[in-house]
């Protein structure tokens, strides 16, 4: 995959270049944002934020709003598309898999650590919704990760399935399950996949049918985004419960909760945050509003930068990774 041309906007003091990295036989497309004032973060190398979207999102679906904010503050950022999505390779298309996305994140972290002038011990993992579960798992297994950010996290697939069952009823869940079984059968027979929409209106057969989900995802989706995934993913998501690892986390974590979230139950996020002794911020908005509503988006970005500055600058000046300052408390603040 050819590298994309570097974009340098002097008015915003942001430089971004297209890069790629391999995962198995496939290639993940990524953007590398260069921090405009890295010296403000102390240390001998730049901190770097590694980030990817939730579930089926692509890097052009609102992630630039966060990455540009980080770059203006002096942080380097690596933003990538999962295999099977966006500009990355991988067949079949639109195949969502927690296991494969975790592999992609691991490869992205290795790539970030190898970038010129990056401090390999000041890598921050950033996740939204489904990918917030990925960064929680990865921070538990990779002791060199400095900190992590979980935005509107979807940490418990079983709890989410129960939420869908209560809201939409057993008939809807049965319909989705039948499509998932058909897709699994198609994969075994090496036939084209059976797909379902990621978002739909209430009553539609789709993964996310909470009020407002379809309109928000349509507004947020970039040019590379497609409103579909292979239906087999439904069987995996119910068993994906990274929240169970939270008690073993000894890394600084910022958890940003949308209190009116209709897609990821806020109560589950609060429970996990307590187990992980995380810093918590609350926003009186819905799941996607942290992208689409300027007020909540800017608040989320500002809180993320403030959190990273507290931990990453401390880590650089103390010679450590900033992981020893957790006192078991839970900091909670409204936007």
Image: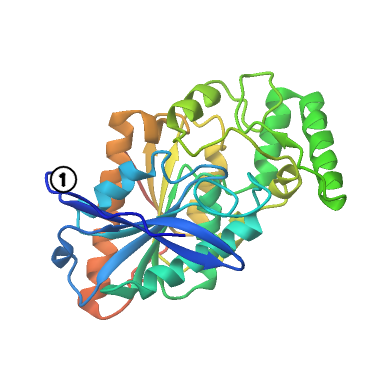
Q: Does residue 175 appear anywhere in the picture? A: yes
Left/right of residue 151 with respect to residue 231 in the rendered view: left
Residue under numbered circle 1: 12
**Residue found 34% across the figure and 28% down from its top:** 293
How far from the left and from the top, in percent, is residue 106? Answer: 52, 67
At x 61%, y 66%, the residue is: 25
Q: Residues within 10 Å of mark 1 (few under 14, many from 20)?
A: few
Tell me residue 14's x, y (percent): 20, 51
Residue 19 position within the rendered picture, expressed as x and y whole percent measured from the top left: 39, 61
Q: Is residue 100 left or right of residue 59?
A: right
211 lies above or below 335: above
Colour scheme of the rendered structure: rainbow
Taking depth in this image into account, of 210 and 38 the one nearest to the observer is 38
Relative height, residue 85 to residue 140 (above, below): above
Tally of numbered discs: 1
The front one of 335 and 28 is 28
Where is 199 relative to 150, above or below? above
Location of residue 79 in the rendering, given as x and y in whole percent from the top left corner? 40, 54
Q: Element under label 1?
A: loop
Tell which residue pokes out farthest to the left in this image: 11
Task: Give the residue displayed 66% in from the left and 46% down from the top.
Answer: 157
Question: Is residue 39 depicted above or below 15 in this figure?
Answer: below
Q: Residue at x 64, y 19 (%)?
A: 202
Q: Is residue 108 left or right of residue 244?
A: left
């Amino acid at each position: 995959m050819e590298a994309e041309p570097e974009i340098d906007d002097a008015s915003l003091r942001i430089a971004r270049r297209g890069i790629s990295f391999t995962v198995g036989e496939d290639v993940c497309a990524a953007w590398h944002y260069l921090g405009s004032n890295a010296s403000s973060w102390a240390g001998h190398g730049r901190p770097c934020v590694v980030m990817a979207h939730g579930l089926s999102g692509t890097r052009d679906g609102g992630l630039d709003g966060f990455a540009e904010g980080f770059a203006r503050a002096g942080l380097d950022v690596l933003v990538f598309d999962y295999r099977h999505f966006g500009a990355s390779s991988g067949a079949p298309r639109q195949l969502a898999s927690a296991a494969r996305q975790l592999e992609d994140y691991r490869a992205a972290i290795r790539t970030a650590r190898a970038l010129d002038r990056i401090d390999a011990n000041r890598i921050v993992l950033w996740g939204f919704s489904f990918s917030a579960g990925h960064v929680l798992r990865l921070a538990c297994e990779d002791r060199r990760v400095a900190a992590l950010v979980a935005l509107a996290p979807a940490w418990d697939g079983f709890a989410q399935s129960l939420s869908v069952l209560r809201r939409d009823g057993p008939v809807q869940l049965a319909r989705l399950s039948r499509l998932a079984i058909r897709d699994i059968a198609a994969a075994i027979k090496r036939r084209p996949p059976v797909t379902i929409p990621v978002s739909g209106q209430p009553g539609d057969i789709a993964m996310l049918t909470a009020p407002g989900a379809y309109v928000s995802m349509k507004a947020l989706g970039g040019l590379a985004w497609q409103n579909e995934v292979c239906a087999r993913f439904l069987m995996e998501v119910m068993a994906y419960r990274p929240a169970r690892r939270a008690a073993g986390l000894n890394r600084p974590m910022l958890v940003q909760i949308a209190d009116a979230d209709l897609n990821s139950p806020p109560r589950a996020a609060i429970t996990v945050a307590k187990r992980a002794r995380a810093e918590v911020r609350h926003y009186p908005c819905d799941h996607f509003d942290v992208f689409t509503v300027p007020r909540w988006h800017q608040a989320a970005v500002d809180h993320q930068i403030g959190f990273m500055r507290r931990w990453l600058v401390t880590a650089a000046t103390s010679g450590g990774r900033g992981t020893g300052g957790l006192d078991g408390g839970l900091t909670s603040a409204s936007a």
